[in-house]
Amino acid sequence: MLEQNLLALSRINPDLRDRLVAAQNSASCYTFLPSRSGQLIPAWRDKTGSAPPRALHSLVDPKREAERLLGICKDEGFLVFLGLGGGFAIESALTRSDIERVLVIDYDIGGIVELFSARDYTTILGDPRVLLLLDAPLSLIEQAILSEYNPALAGGIRVLPLRSRTEFDTARFNATFDTIQRAINLVNNDYSVQASFGMRWFSNIVHNILSMDIDAQDAPFPAVKHVSITAAGPSLDIQLPRLVETRDNTFLMATDTSLPALLQAGLTPDAVVSIDCQHISYVHFMLGLPCPLYLDLASPPLVASRTQRPRFFSSGHPLTRYVSRKWRHLPAVDTSGGNVTYAAMSLADSLGAAVIALYGADFAYPLGRAYARGTYMNPSFERRQTRLAPYESLASAFLYRSAALKRVYQKNSWYYETPLLSMYRSRLEAKAATLHATVKLAKGLGAPIKIRQLAPRPKPALLFESGHTAPCVGLSATAFLADYCERINALPRLTSGAYIKRLDAESRLVFATLLPLAAAFKRRNPRLHSADIIEQSCVWSVSEIERVCLSSVHQQSWAESD
């Protein structure tokens, strides 16, 4: 029996199979009892010998018990089982076509060898939808959730603890449950953003790909030494004099939101960074763009049009990575912090900066103010104000639109913060600890940022030149997009669970580019099955590429006729 189970496991997870072979079966964790329906039931031994063995499943009909348990899983296509036991509930889950992924977590690998020696688990171990983690560290469990759980395909996720097993190891299973919950929250936050912007990201990238179809080589990103990054927090107003004093000795990198404040103060930055995919980003450049623009490839084409040669980089969107890998090399910039200050700091470090100084990085609303003068919504409020709706009331309505405001007092001052701003701040703090550059903070009014950097850190490789066609694919933009459409159309249709696992390496790369789109379609219609979501994502992406390319052809013909 053990040989059969290990053989089934070796096809899916050979490393775990080797660990089980090497495991010493000396724990004597289990004994086995017959059920009335004829199944062999594992029973946990009391190691003190003071209590009889505890059966992990019903001694009447464990299969019927498993079916009742799975009956509560209606919209959850990702199941996490805490405790393997006899595997009855897992086997029941695998009979359902709507179950996309199954994660099984257990401890005491010697006890698992006992289970594999007594009962047939080949149905579970041979299914590609199943991932079995034994004695795994919490970091690996978290990574498994982050990498395997895709709400767009699986829908919801449910944790199903085998109570009769977990109560014998409450400390480890409780820590496991908490880790899973944290990972689920991270996935859901990312999924919410993808569902909101998936379609817009895709359309922006396609537009920008067409604008990159030029023969001229882009200039390389410059190496820098001392970088000052300006965010648009209210503290920037009081920090501008310091920026003026140090202007000649620093590479001034502005976030798009802070650009108007710098121009109004007579400061011309050396570069501007923008990552927002929303068209409102265009208003940040109404006063002009007198310097190079570093732009996420998923940014609005309207923003890219503000300069003749935007310097695109690849962010976390899978389609931008696919473009960089298969067509034109783009520098990779970490934008996972969710805000442009984080992205600018990552870019500056990749350019070889030894020191990075942050200005206007408040990550809070000090004294009830949201942004520095002249930035974001402030010019709009100034234009729209009336006697009945003065500037202060418009700004207050904007500030108090969030119900999650929390007032925090500090020395001689105070500020509001929100969960989103706190998350941005904590991500920036974590990123700063990994940089080669030394991060410094200008004295301001916002929430305190705790920079704990590790030393020494390896110096990063400088960003390579952008815009070069990959030597293996000498395609124009339209030819590349046509090839991409063919690859989308060639994706196999979903016939069973674990769709991504069944794809070859190239098809997996192509399908990954559609995942943000899938999230958008899932949000529009939560009842859609995985097969329908994949179908809609493929059809819409191809039609959008054709629409954008046709529009580009018409614009070019109009320009030639003029």
Image (tube, rainbow, N blue to C red):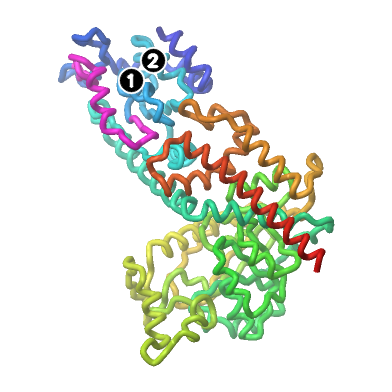
Mark 2: secondary structure: loop
Res 448 quadrant in image: bottom left
* Mark 2, residue position: 121
Residue 87's disc is 1
Residue 407 screen position, x and y as percent: 32, 72
- Residue 35 to residue 283: above or below: above
Q: What residue lies at 60% left-to-right and 32% top-to-bottom?
A: 491
Task: Mark 2 or mark 1: name the one nearer the start of the chain.
Answer: 1
When the figure is inspected, residue 261 is found, relative to residue 317, above or below; the finding is below
Image label count: 2
Let me know if residue 535 is in the magenta part: no
What amino acid type should be assigned to the residue bearing mark 2? Tyr
Kindly check if marks 2 and 1 are in contact, taking CB atoms under 8 A apart as contact: yes
Of 551 and 366, the residue lying toward us: 551
Q: CA distance from mark 2 to mark 1?
A: 7 Å
Q: Which residues are magenta?
A: 53-81
Kind of residue at badge 1: Gly
Work out which quarter of the rendered image holds the N terminus and state it.
Answer: top left
Q: Would residue 100 be found to the left or right of residue 460 on screen?
A: left
The image shows residue 411 at horizontal and vertical percentages of: 37, 79
Question: From where the camera sits, is residue 348 visible?
Answer: no
Q: Position of residue 270 (x, y in %)?
A: 70, 72
